[in-house]
Amino acid sequence: MAKTDMFAPLTDALGLQEKLEILLKHWVEHNEEHAGEFQKWAEKAKALGHVDTYN
């Protein structure tokens, strides 16, 4: 089954440059949220003595 592009409507209304700007901003924010969660779990691993996981 082919994966549909959930952002396809943006391409219809906007040019590629505008679509990329929107997507990149979204992905950066999304990845920053993940980084915060990773840091929390790394701290928990460190507290359990898994220092290699933290580093």
Image (spheres, grey):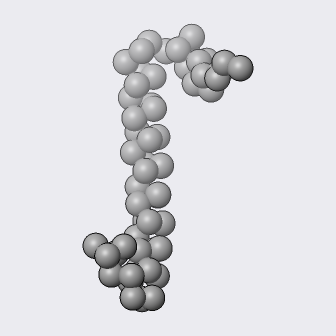
- In the image, residue 30 sits, relative to residue 12, either above or below, namely below
Image position, residue 47 (x, y; %): 42, 89
Residue at x-position 45% and y-position 22%? 19
Extreme-left residue of the structure: 55
- Toward which corner of the image does residue 45 lie, by quadrant? bottom left
- In the image, residue 46 sits, relative to residue 55, either above or below, namely below
- In the image, residue 44 sits, relative to residue 41, either above or below, namely below
Q: How many badges with numbers are in the image? A: 0
Residue at x-position 46% and y-position 82%? 44
Residue at x-position 40% and y-position 39%? 25
Q: Quadrant of the N terminus?
A: top right
Extreme-right residue of the structure: 1
Image position, residue 48 (x, y; %): 45, 88
Image position, residue 24 (x, y; %): 40, 35
- In the image, residue 48 sits, relative to residue 28, either above or below, namely below
Image position, residue 49 (x, y; %): 39, 88
In the foreground, 13 or 51 = 51
- Toward which corner of the image does residue 18 lie, by quadrant? top left
In the foreground, 15 or 38 = 38
Residue at x-position 47% and y-position 49%? 30
